[in-house]
Image: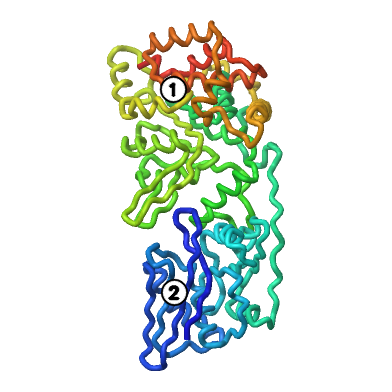
Amino acid sequence: MLAQVHSFVLQGIDPLACEVEVDVGEAGVARTTVVGLPDTAVKESTERVRSAMVNSGYPFPMARLLVNLAPADIPKSGPVFDLPIAVGLLLAERAIRTQRHKRLLFAGELALDGRIRPVSGIINLALLCRQLELDGVVVPVDNAHEAAAVEGVEVYPADTLSSVVAFLNEQHEIEPLAAGQWGHDAGVLLPGDLDFADVRGQEAVKRALMIAASGAHNVLMIGPAGTGKSMLAKRLPGILPPMSADEALEVTRIYSAVGKVPKGTTLLGRRPVRAPHHTASSVAVIGGGAIPRPGEVSLAHHGVLFLDEMPEFPRAVLETLRQPLEDGDVTIARAQGTVRFPARFMLVGALNPTPKGDAPTDEVSQRQMERYLAKMSGPMIDRVDIHIEVPRIAFKELTGQPNGTDSATLRAQVSAAREVQCKRNGGPLKTNATLTGRELDRLASLDEGGKSLLQAAMTELNLSARAYDKIRRVARTIADIAGESAVTQPHIAEAIQYRLLDRQL
C-alpha cells in the first residue's frame, strides 16, 4: 500500500516541499530501500523508525519497503525525515485511519523508544507551511517555540510517536502552541555586557566606532599590541540598535538551518557577533561543503564579524570576503546547483602594524610593516570604510579615574543617527553603508568646499573610485550624527582622516 506524507528539505536556508512516499509491498523478504539522494543519516532513519515503532507498540511491516523522497534531484540530509517516514508506514499499515495528515507538515528525529528529538530548520518549515497555505506543522516539543514565531500557522508540539498517532486518529488532541510574542530590549545594557567606559582613553577611536555603528560601516583598527583594540571591538555590539522583527526573522532562519537556535527561543533578538580564529578555513568562514551550509559571514548577518589580527588569516580566506562585503550575500556553487546565503554584516578588524606588534620607528621597521600589511590585498582594504589608528595610552590616562564616554551615551547617538536614516528612506531602515550609487549622489551631494577637499585628497592619496564612495558614505553618516541635512567640508575632512591605510601606504 502507498502513503504520502508532507515534509520539507532545505536548499541553503530556503525551504522546499518534500513529499515522503512510503510503499509497502507484499509480505516476504524484508528489505528497505530509501531513494531520492539521501545521505547516510537519512538512510539510517529506517532503523530508528523500526525500533521507535516497535517500542511504541506498533508492528513494523515484514515486507519490501520503498521510501521515496521527492523531488529526487535535491540532496536530503539529517534525521528530519524520521517522523514523516514513520507516519507514512503507519498510514500504509492502517494504524492511522484518518486523512488529517494531508493538511499538515511533519519533521522530527525519532529516538529508539519513540521520543521525538529536535531537528534543524523548523522555522523554515513553518514559513513553508504558510506559503503552501496548509493548516499547520507537527514538530518536536523543543522546536515548537521556534515554529510559533511564524504567524498564521498552527504549531502542534509532539513529544512521542504515540501522541502523534493518537492526534492523527483524533483520539487525543495536541494543543497548538500560541504564536510567540517577540520583543527586544530597548537598548539597555543587560548583565554581562561590556561597556566602553571600561576603556581608558581612546576617545577618538570610540567616536570612529560610533560612526561605524551609526552607518553600519566596516572598520579596521591598527595599532601596537596592548592598546585596547580587542577591548574596543568586543564593546562595539553593545552600542548597536536592537534588530527589527524582519531582521530577527532572517537571522533566526540562518541559525535554525544549522541547529543553533536555543531551546524555547522564538526569535533571536540580539545582533549576532562572530569571532572566528585565524586558523579558520575558507569553508568555515564563507560557507560551503558537499551540502552547502552557512559560514561565519552568514552567521554574522545583521551583526558583527570580528577578525582579530587580520594579517594572520590566510590570504585566501580574506579574499573570500570580497563578495559579501560588496553584495551582502554569498553564492555557493556546486555541481547540483547554486545556493545563496545572506551575509550583510559589519566587518571589524584589528591588526598590529608589524609581526612583533610594535609601531614602525625607522626605515627597516617601516618596510616590515609594509610587508606585513601586504598580506591583505589592496582591493580588500579598499572595501573597508574606516581605518583608524589606536595609539598607545599615556600612563596618566591608565592610572587616572575612568571618565571616558560610556556605551549608553554612544548607543543614544547611534540610535538617533539610524532614526534619521530611517525617516529619510521613508520605510524600512537602509543604512548609509548600503546606499546605491544613485542614492548616494542624491543624499551625499557635496558643496564646493567639500568637492575641492575631496579632489585634493584623491590626487594626493591616489584613492580609488570605491574609496571616493566610501568617504562620501562616512561623511553622510557624520552629518546624520550632527543632525545636518547637507554634507559639508568638515564632514568630508573627518571622513578622509579615517582612511589611515591609504595615507600610510
Specify the label residue 466 is tagged with: none
Q: Position of residue 310 (x, y in %)?
A: 39, 32
Crowdedness near tag 2: few (<14), some (14–19) or many (≥20) residues, C-alpha within 10 Å: many
In the current view of this chain or complex, which residue is farthest to the bottom?
28
Looking at the image, which residue is at 43% across and 18% down? 500
Looking at the image, which residue is at 47% across and 21% down? 469
Looking at the image, which residue is at 35% across and 31% down? 311
Crowdedness near tag 1: few (<14), some (14–19) or many (≥20) residues, C-alpha within 10 Å: many
366 relative to 326, above or below? above
Image quadrant occupied by the C terminus: top left
Q: Is residue 66 left or right of residue 171?
A: left
Disc 2 residue type?
Answer: Ser
Foreground of the two, 155 or 297:
155
Disc 1 residue type?
Answer: Gly
Q: Position of residue 365 (x, y in %)?
A: 31, 17
505 relative to 234, above or below? above
Specify the label residue 45 is tagged with: 2
- The answer to whether residue 398 shows anywhere in this view is no
308 relative to 387, above or below? below
Q: Is residue 86 left or right of residue 404?
A: left
Q: Position of residue 385 (x, y in %)?
A: 47, 25
- The answer to whether residue 168 shows anywhere in this view is yes
Q: Is residue 125 left or right of residue 466?
A: right
Specify the label residue 223 is tagged with: 1
- Label 1 element class: loop
Foreground of the two, 193 or 98:
98
